Image (spheres, rainbow, N blue to C red):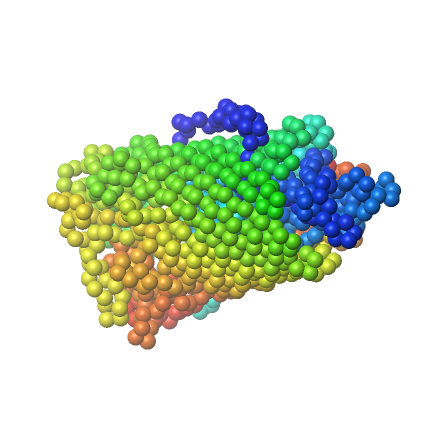
Amino acid sequence: MQSTRPRARLLAILLATACAFLIGGAGFGQTITGTVQGYISDVEGGAIPGATVTVTNQDTGIARAVISDANGFYSAKALQVGTYSVTAELSGMQTTQQSDVSVLVGQIKDVNLTLEIESTSEVITVTSEAPIIEVSRSGAANYIDEVAIESLPTVGRDFTDFAILTPGVQRDTSRGFLTIAGQRGMYSGLSVDGADNKSTFFGYGRGGEATENDGLIIAQDTVRQFQVITNGFSAEYGRHGGAFVNVVTKSGTNEVRGSAFYYFRDDSLAEDLPSSPLDDFNDRDGSRPVDTFDTQNYGVSIGGPFKQDRTHYYFGIDQRDQDIPFTRFLTNRGGSVYDLIMQRAQSEPAFAALVDGFDRNADGSATGLFTRSVSNQILFGKLDHQISDANLITLRANWTDFERTSEFLDEESLKTEDTLSIIASMTSVVGSRGVNEFRIQTADDNLDRLSLRVGTPIEAQVRFRWNGASVGKFDFLPIFVEESQLQVKNDFSYLFGAHDMKFGVDYSKDDLAQLFAGSRDGRYDFRSPEDFLSNNASAARIWFGDSTYPNYDETQTALAAYGQDSLKRDNLTLNYGLRYTSTDNPDGLDHLHPDGRQIPDTENLAPRFGFAMAQDEGRSVLRGGIGFFFGRTPTLLFANQVQANGVPPNYGRITVGPGENGYVPLGTPINNENPPPGIIPAISYVDPEFDDAQTLRASLGWERELGGGWSGGIDAVYAEATGLQRNTDFNRVFAGYDEYGRPMWNGRTGGCPGVDGVECAEILVRQSRGDSEYQAVTLKVNRRFTGRYQFNAHYTWGKDRDTDSNERSATGVTISDTGNLDYDWGLSNRDVEHRLVVTGMIQLPADFQVSGILNYQSGRPYTLVDNGVDFRYCSSVGWNCPDYRAVMDGLVVGRNTERNESIQTVDVRVGKFFRFGNDMRLDVFVEAFNLFDQHSFNVGFNQRNIRNGNVPDDFGIPGSLNGLTRPRRLQIGGRFSF
């Protein structure tokens, strides 16, 4: 849908940037810069105050000068990521310089220099290698640098795939969110260039529907490096549960540099799909060739100076094109569905459109070959300008356009998403001890999810319950979502002696508009072929309510303020601070239920403390901390309170049968906005006691520099979350417990609790009553890239438990027993007990280069179920509904007590580069994913279903290929750079 909101508020950005000038550079929630600090001393170890320390970016020539204090301490903050030289000078003393100091995003690098009595005019160059470990960082963090991004194999060229290579990070299996250190994916933070890069509505990264469907929002070629913080205790961090990914994009340098790249893969470069253990058990060969596909990714980038040492630019274009043919089947269990539809089409020709694209097989089943096509384009631009020695301004824009089309009309056959993010920031040096950073972002995310069946005679979804087949339009379509965010942030830090104090504010205004009218055209269930031919549906799910865009149009504002201090005494650094957050949600809403007339506002205080103790002259460090964090709740969870408020005509999705009020036969137009009298509404609202989820995090770690570029360490991480979002139905009737202690529910109350004289169907209430606990220990060893190779390895043992693993479930009950919330306590769906990751790159003679990734991890857990009972946890058994846990040996099994097969994969990249002159280079390479073609399988529902206590013959035998172990695939690529 064409956006009705401004696509770019450039004027607002320019005005706000001008304000930053006016307050004298009087300036970051998520740090995208780094710090170089240390002590200046004489040869006897005495402090040297008043020394001028100049920190110069070796790529851009931009320099920062600071003065050492009475203790000889200096600090150059808010430095752009890059490689620096550090020079210390004082009249009468020999000037000393250390070069090649690498500053990563969010990093604090300690560089101590010694000045001698002047005996010559030459500069003393320190030849010892720059420090590897951060002796002033208190939190647990890991870095992905430019060498890793450019050299390691990645099948999708999605930079977040690199985050998964760090300890405690994985993808949620239900929605693909990044989950970090035991927190739900919707509470994981994602910051790009210091600004929030998450969808306030959906809770995933901006453009999440594109990234879930083979698209990208941030091009890998524009990412310079990023930081993954599993436990960060700075009070400036917020909007998440304490763990986040912090990304900084590339900038231009004093040299004009550019590149062009091309990547290609298709089905001819992939192995066949393997047979599963379940296939072997059933004595059948399940192997088959992969469906044909074709994926191409190409782009160009260029960066350089408009003016040396002053103004730099960087631009990039990234394009992905993909065609993926796939097969769909209509089975003939209980009779041919294809023949049945064509039989009805003889008298009602419109029904023939339901099997468009399918061909009948000899046995009555039908097969259709369809193609999905993806087009994804990204445009990126960045300008850095050093206005004066004290002020640096940066402008950055990132625009994406994603489209996926499908010939198969019974899915989201047209999905489009376009995003635009514009960021302006100014970093200002205030006097000799202050630094201010101001940042403003405007971001738009517009999503359309459509069906190309619109305009065909039959648009409803038709389900054949005796057969398991479904045809027709996906019933929750169409969906239109428009998000517009304005974010303004300002941070100011000042060095008071040994105290490095920092204060900041972060304001965001999110305008959210959506159309959701699920089942607007109806979803019809038929229990027999005869019922279908006579148009006698057993039930229909129909939406009654506002069906015009937007039927949810609200604004949310959020404000955060913090203060923190970093106290450095000799080898000890203490960090402590407090963060305040408040969120203003819509109120004065129309709603049938009194509790649904406003969405609760939230206010929270989050204290944080951390420490770092350097040991052995800075070659090792002991670090740790503890703090509270509050995640931001996706506003998708609030939308249904407006769209299904029980006030005519907004009765929501109701399920009715023939003869009941609201039933409309298949093929008859539905008047969604004029429901007949007597309909029983299904309503939803947010519990008045609802609050954002709170996480208590603590960590303790030790790291040691081993020499030769090597370091090793150990980290222990703990996280305990309370107030996690869960759903319950306030209108179901508790029927006690069965003989094994399983809770049972039985129908509706016949009324509408909280509203007199009214009958309701489901009353879906969102509560903050979930808990989780995460414990992990990581052993790690790293070698930074020096000489010819780089190496990283870590092993993590972890335990992740919770009462509910849903990722912002918008429908369905997630609480089994409201009287005993711990009934659902068990291993989280995210739990991975053991994980080993090894990555490395080596440059070989003759300009060859080899890199690789080894990943081993335990399988995910699953629950043994009994689908032979119906305890009526929710109206849709088995979908967004708690499992009916099975009974084994007379006892109810716990949640997630079984585990799927473990995973082992090796990805390798082999390349060679060719030089042309001094400045041009061509790289050609081949990447192999799952090099040894190793597979693991998950146990399917039928193989874990002990129906009425009857254990199936194939119990526990896995039959579903784990997506992380897809067959070996090759990717061919090339890059030309100058």
Left or right: 526, with 631 as reference point = left
Identify the residue at image location x=26%, y=68%.
741
On the image, the x and y values in percent for residue 862 come to 41, 63
Identify the residue at image location x=32%, y=76%.
889
On the image, the x and y values in percent for residue 478 come to 35, 37
Can residue 777 be seen by looking at this rendering? yes
On the image, the x and y values in percent for residue 668 come to 22, 37
Figure quadrant of the N terminus? top left
Residue 383, quarter of picture? top right
Q: Nearer the viewer, residue 930 or 554?
A: 554
Can residue 879 be seen by looking at this rendering? no
Which residue is outermost to the left? 757
Left or right: 653, with 115 as reference point = left
Is residue 854 shown above or below 760? below
Identify the residue at image location x=41%, y=55%.
721
Is residue 80 shown above or below 733? above
Left or right: 914, with 165 as reference point = right
Identify the residue at image location x=13%, y=45%.
756
Which residue is outermost to the right? 120
On the image, the x and y values in percent for residue 209 come to 45, 42
